[in-house]
Image (cartoon, grey):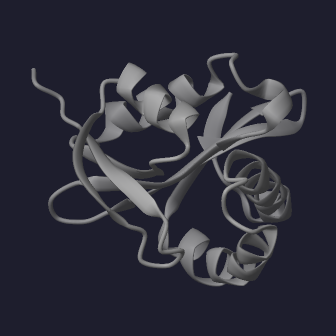
Amino acid sequence: MIKHLEDNEIEEVMDVWLKTNITAHNFIPEDYWIGQCEVVLEEYLPSSTTFVYKEDNVIKGFISIKKNKKYSFIGALFILEEYQQKGIGKKLVNHCKSLDSPLEVCAYVENVNAVNFYRHCGFSIISKQPNENSGVMEYTMQWKNDS
């Protein structure tokens, strides 16, 4: 079930965030992700709207979005490895699509699985640039409701 993140779930979400980042982005040193935990916990999560996918009392994944005047930005979409390829990510993205358009997301160029996932969800690449924190090349991708 998809629901808003509750305060007592933040530690579990951070665990999902760290484990999945390290696995999905093995081209970036693990220490980088560990160093980003405090920023995510203290700055990003409090300023974002976060939805969790929770089943059998386990958070299997989550998505966080930040809204600005022009679009909503998906700053985080992470599914625990053992629950990937089961439609959870698509359900979370579709939930956000039902709330707002356009949506934008950045995905590392080397994270081919993420890039292909977002393409499958209807996103198009609109630019390529170095990530402002890690310096690793990323795509900005966008989805618009054309109806």
User: Image quadrant of residue 10?
Assistant: bottom right
In percent of the image, x 62 and y 40: which residue is there? 3
Residue 101 horizontal side relative to residue 133, left or right: left
Which sits in the foreground, 68 or 37?
37
Q: Relative to 57, does residue 74 appear above or below in the rendering?
A: below
> Could you tell me residue 56's position as x and y percent?
89, 27
Which sits in the foreground, 61 or 28?
28
Residue 36 horizontal side relative to residue 132, left or right: right
> Could you tell me residue 80's position as x and y percent?
79, 38
Q: Relative to 126, does residue 73 appear above or below in the rendering?
A: below
Q: Residue placed farthest to the top in the image?
A: 86
> Could you tell me residue 46's position as x and y percent?
57, 74
Residue 82 horizontal side relative to residue 114, left or right: right
User: Image quadrant of residue 98?
Assistant: top left
Q: Which quarter of the figure is the N terminus placed in? A: top right
In percent of the image, x 15 and y 59: which residue is there? 70
Q: Relative to 57, does residue 19 appear above or below in the rendering?
A: below
> Could you tell me residue 50's position as x and y percent?
56, 54
Q: Relative to 133, does residue 69 appear above or below in the rendering?
A: above
In percent of the image, x 72 and y 26: which residue is there? 84
